[in-house]
């Protein structure tokens, strides 16, 4: 009985590991196909005014307090390659959580999910504005649902962490 349970957990870990690898590879490929123009651009966009006027245009006030911390990722400047790396990482994590929540294991379905998420109009427009600030809200919201789905955790822990990640998602978007 113990061996069967151990084998089950090992198979589950292997499937989760391959799901994460597939999500990462698919995200890199689709992000580079769809947004390479933004990642390899050598200039910042006009709406990234903090690069020109630091401190004057601070949208990180009021309800969007998380943006102050997210701006530390990009050093308060729009570096297209850095925003591309962050976008790919956030997408890979988001696509992994979507697939795990919905129990999707097919590579073709992962490609469809990644294509829908990555080529969304709001994502394309985000490359003209603030990539990390907008794209970090999705993994936080998905983390809330992902934690809520964990049946082996106590309800108080799931509610606490779920509410925490929803709050971070709202504060960053």
Image (spheres, rainbow, N blue to C red):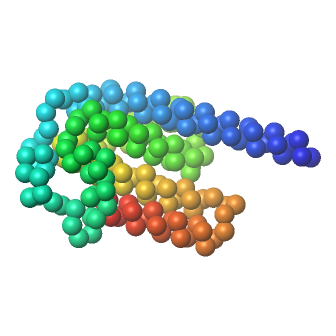
Look at 60% across and 68% down and name the residue there: 157
Q: Work out whether residue 35 or residue 110 is closer to the camera in this orientation and state it.
A: 35
Q: Where is residue 141 in the image (x, y as percent from the top left)?
A: 43, 58
In which quadrant of the rendered view does residue 35 lie?
A: top left
Using the image as rendered, state which of residue 170 and residue 112 is in the foreground. 170
Which of the 4 quarters of the picture holds residue 131? top left
Residue lying at 79% horizontally and 42% vertically, measured from the top left: 8
Residue 33 visible? The answer is yes
Residue 25: % across, % down: 47, 29
Q: Can residue 121 be seen in this view?
A: no
Q: Residue at x 18, y 61 (%)?
A: 59
Percent across and percent down for residue 37 are 22, 28
**Residue at 56% from the left image edge and 51% from the top image edge:** 101
Q: Height in image: 173 above or below 22?
A: below
Left or right of residue 94, residue 52 in this image: left
Number of callouts in the render? Answer: 0
- Which quarter shows the C terminus? bottom left
* On screen, residue 115 above or below 65: above
Is 125 on the left or on the right of 111, as rendered?
left
148 vs 55, left or right, is right
Q: Position of residue 130 (x, y in %)?
A: 23, 48
Question: In front here: 56 or 120?
Answer: 56
């Amino acid at each position: 009985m113990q061996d069967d349970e151990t084998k089950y957990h090992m198979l589950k870990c292997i499937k989760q590991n391959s799901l994460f690898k597939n999500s990462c590879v698919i995200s890199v490929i689709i992000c580079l196909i769809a947004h390479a123009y933004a990642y390899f651009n050598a200039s910042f966009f006009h709406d990234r005014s903090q690069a020109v006027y630091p401190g004057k245009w601070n949208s990180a006030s009021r309800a969007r307090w998380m943006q102050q911390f997210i701006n530390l990722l990009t050093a308060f400047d729009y570096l297209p390659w850095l925003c591309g790396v962050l976008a790919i990482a956030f997408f890979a994590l988001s696509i992994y959580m979507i697939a795990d929540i919905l129990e999707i294991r097919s590579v073709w379905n992962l490609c469809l999910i990644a294509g829908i998420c990555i080529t969304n109009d709001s994502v394309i427009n985000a490359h003209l504005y603030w990539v990390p600030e907008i794209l970090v809200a999705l993994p936080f919201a998905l983390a809330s649902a992902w934690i809520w789905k964990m049946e082996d955790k106590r309800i108080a822990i799931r509610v606490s962490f779920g509410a925490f990640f929803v709050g971070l998602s709202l504060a960053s978007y």
